Image (cartoon, helix red, strand yellow):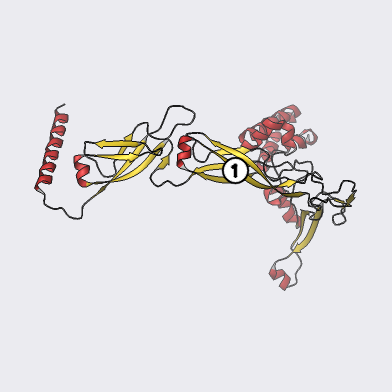
Amino acid sequence: KDGEGVSDEEEVLLTPDQRAREEEQRWRMQGGDADAIRAFARATEAYTVMANPERKRVYEAHGSGGLHRRLSGPRFSDPMRDAYKLELEFKTGRFEMEFGFREGQKKSTGNVHHNLKIPLLGFYQGFTMEVAIVRSELCAACNGTGAAQDAEMLTCTKCTGTGKLATSSHWRSRRARRERREGGFDQTVTLGCVRCLGTGKLPSEPCPECKGKRTFDGQTTVKVVVEPGTLEGHSYTFKEQAEQAPDAVAGDVVLHVGAEEHDDFEREGNDLVCRRNITLAQALLGFKMTVTHLDGREIEIERDEVTKPGQEHTVPGMGMPIHGRPGEFGNMVVRLTIVFPERIAVDEERTRDLRRADERAKKRRSAGWRG
């Protein structure tokens, strides 16, 4: 029952592999039950939507109608994306490629992504900044039509009102051209008309403000509020603040924040990491030192035990704020590097200190063994 299969509207989301599996399933169903076929197609479509984050987002915003109208973004008629169509065009020797938005598809100028660098202290204490975005904006005088107030909209003579221009060519290999053999491929490329910008209409008199260009260079300002403890790479989305264009929805501006390089500290998740050098004597006998925090506080570091190469000293609660959990902080991690002397000078007092430290270490070890 070929005519009782899934409709074109139901099949629009299925990939070639899914269509092939669906066709196989149809043949396996006994009696060709149309209701069973439709139920299987709906289940397959539901899985396809939920498995794709972008399609899921469009479905939640616009429903199934948004998916079938292809609101998820620009889609191009590209033969390389469809194995069945690609095989057919190789057999017929004719390729057609259409660039731009399909008929009935909601146009968008696309999202714009920018990276922002702020001081590491901004992630610790919080940070607010205003960002200026330079963009194209619709002319306020003509509302993006490019026409004067009393002008008429005439059919574009270049594209004859279609808004598109098609260019056809025939491709043959260099060897075939040299040997003057027939064969090759016919190729048709369709682009938007540059004269009418794809609208198919031109004004009889251009707008005196924008000179018929429909847009002009403008600027808008957005405010970025970085809360204490925000992780690097966090994104801030400003809806419809990107480029403006006639008959299109402005895209979003997405700002990604990162930390500038700090002279003393690095951030690892919620921890602050710094590096310090100590001498061999400090590694064996212990030491005290002061570390200046990001906010200027002096943090005392004290160790009275042997420090091994590559060992770290952790100060709990002195790291970065944990975002969303007020009053909680990560740790400060001091990574210690032992600087060994090039030569050892004989110093009786220092030698006695080392021997006493060695004896104390032996006693601690023996006490641990007995325990």
Please state if 237 lies on the left or on the right of 167 as rendered: left
The N terminus appears in which quarter of the rendering? top right
Residue 35 shows up from this direction:
yes
Circle 1: residue type: Val
Q: Is residue 314 above or below residue 242?
A: above
Q: Residues within 10 Å of mark 1 (few under 14, many from 20)?
A: few
Count of numbered circles in the view: 1
Residue 77 placed where, x, y %?
73, 49
Q: Position of residue 216 (x, y in %)?
A: 74, 50
The residue that appears at 73% across and 41% down in the rendered structure is: 249
> In this rendering, would 201 be left or right of 288?
right
Farthest-out residue, front: 296
In this rendered view, identify the residue nearer to me: 14 or 71: 71
Location of residue 139 with respect to 174 vertically, above or below = above
Compare residues 268 and 170 and report the one nearer the observer.
Answer: 268
Q: Residue 292 placed where, x, y %?
A: 35, 40
Q: Quadrant of residue 159?
A: bottom right
**Label 1: which residue?**
131
Location of residue 340 in the rendering, given as x and y in whole percent from the top left corner: 22, 50
**Which image quarter is the C terminus in?**
top left
Residue 359 is left or right of residue 247, and the answer is left
Q: Secondary structure at mark 1?
A: strand
Q: Is residue 52 visible?
A: no
Which residue is located at x 49 percent, y 28 percent? 324
On screen, residue 86 above or below 371: below
